[in-house]
Image: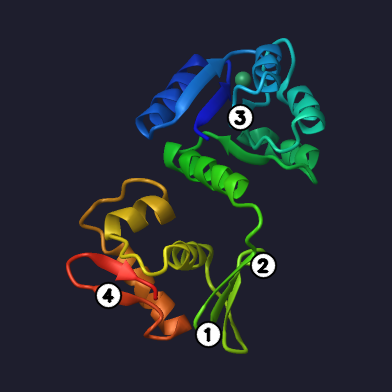
Amino acid sequence: MNRILIAEDEERIASFVAKGLRAEGFTPTVVADGQSALDHALAGEADLVVLDIGLPVMDGFAVLERLSAECPALPVIVLTARDSLTTTVAALEGGAADYMAKPFRFDELLARVRLRLRDQSEPAVLELTVGDVTLDLRRHRASLGDKVVELSAREMTLAEVLVRHRGQVLSREQLLSQVWGYDFDPGSNVVDVYVGYLRKKLGSDFVTTVRGAGYRVD
Ligand code: CA
């Protein structure tokens, strides 16, 4: 689950994305036109496609149409110019694809790639329960007993990662890379701050601090 097809005719963007993904352990392949993108994807050689809309030979919309008909489970992240974002979003409405406006930061793309590949490998779980806390992953909210608690997207992801690894200690670095999706300044206390938010909302014993090692949910 790490083969990423990058369909992008701007060489600068394609090589920047490919380089970044390779550094994160993915296997990227770059193609510069829509027909090649389609051929590659239909041959089953990609686990995820990063697809530019403005491509020669066949544009991204046409590629997407064929892909959603022939490989509906293949995740696609569409890249589009910011000034045509509205058109793109309208065109994608109801489809499975995610989109990003150019210019984008690599870490934003990486977070989406990871999320999409994870959705792909774990499609069935919609609710996670631990003790009297339930996370509703579809509606993005939590409940504590019979009380509904609103969590921000980041708080929800942090809670989800901790609960999916219940019983295991996760270090700050592991939580940073899984929740924030990129390398934060290791001196940052963002994880501790967000654990504090979760305790305030879900009860002080929701997360255990393991001194010198990290955090754990039991
Ligand atoms: Ca282009």
Mark drawn on residue 132: 1
Is the Cβ of the residue at disc 1 closer than 8 Å to that at disc 4?
Answer: no
Q: Residues within 10 Å of mark 3 (few under 14, many from 20)?
A: many
Residue 176 location (% of width, % of height): 35, 55
- The amino acid marked with disc number 3 is Val
Mark 3–mark 4 distance (CA, rounded to whole Å): 39 Å
Q: Secondary structure at mark 3?
A: strand
The quadrant the C terminus occupies is bottom left
Q: Label 4: which residue?
A: 209
Mark in the foreground, 3 or 4: 4
* Ligand 1 image-quadrant field: top right
Q: Is residue 102 above or below residue 19?
A: below
* Residue farthest front in this picture: 167
Front-most of residues 171 and 15: 171
Front-most of residues 145 and 155: 145
Mark 1–mark 4 distance (CA, rounded to whole Å): 19 Å
| Disc nearer the start of the sequence (3/2) | 3
Q: Label 2: which residue?
A: 139
Q: Label 3: which residue?
A: 49
Classify residue 175 as left or right of residue 80. Answer: left
- The amino acid marked with disc number 2 is Arg
State how many labels appear: 4
| Disc nearer the start of the sequence (4/2) | 2
Q: Secondary structure at mark 4?
A: strand
Is the Cβ of the residue at disc 3 closer than 8 Å to that at disc 1?
Answer: no
Residue 28 location (% of width, % of height): 48, 24
Q: Is residue 9 above or below residue 197?
A: above
Mark in the foreground, 4 or 2: 4
Mark drawn on residue 118: none
- The amino acid marked with disc number 1 is Asp
Mark in the foreground, 3 or 1: 1
